[in-house]
Image (tube, rainbow, N blue to C red):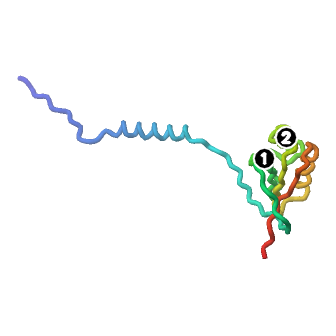
Amino acid sequence: MKFRRQSRDQEGVNLTPLIDVVFLLLIFFMVSTTFTKETHLQLDLPEADGPQASTESQVLEIVIAADGSYAIDGRSLVNKQLDTVKKALSEVAAGEYNRPLVITADAKAEHQSVVRAMDAAGQLGFVQLSITTRQPEN
């Protein structure tokens, strides 16, 4: 007697290839995404009356937060010591100590932090030094 074979048609949709493709896309986007660490310090600048200085493209900037932490050209420093500030300044300046240097300090930052930044700049030979302020509100 010859029996007829039953057809084995699938009644549902196979989701295994779809899940594989989703995982591959997820891995692709995780690997190809660039992660950037940006330093965004909230500063409350001190007020001063006076003419505004012109901004130049080759200006180095030291940012001092309220807690006394430093960032030079957007890169945060690991500690608050004078040697660390000097080393970071010399690396960023690359021997060009005639470039203008701007110190941007929070109004609540300790005076010692600002003096330390000025001392480091002076020891390295920076002569064009300015401090950022904002116009008083009337």
Q: SS for tag 2? A: loop
The residue under label 1 is 58
- What percent of the width, then of the height, locates residue 88? 82, 42
- What percent of the width, then of the height, locates residue 27? 50, 38
Residue visible at 80% across and 41% down? Answer: 92
- Asked if residue 83 lies left or right of residue 76, the reply is right
Residue visible at 24% across and 37% down? Answer: 10
Placement of the N terminus among the 4 image quadrants: top left
Residue sitting nearer the eye, 20 or 3: 20
Q: Is residue 118 above or below residue 21?
A: below
Residue visible at 81% across and 71% down? Answer: 136
Residue sitting nearer the eye, 30 or 63: 63
Amino acid under disc 2: Glu
Placement of the C terminus among the 4 image quadrants: bottom right
Residue visible at 82% across and 59% down? Answer: 53
Graded by Cα atoms within 10 Å as few (under 14), some (14 to 19) or many (20 or more), the crowding at tag 1 reads few
- What percent of the width, then of the height, locates residue 30? 54, 40
Specify which label sits upstream in the sequence, 2 or 1.
1
- Asked if residue 123 lies left or right of residue 108, the reply is right
Residue sitting nearer the eye, 132 or 16: 132
The residue under label 2 is 96
Amino acid under disc 1: Gln
**Mark 2 and mark 1 residues within 8 Å of each other at the beta carbon:** yes
Q: SS for tag 1? A: loop
Residue at far bottom of view: 138
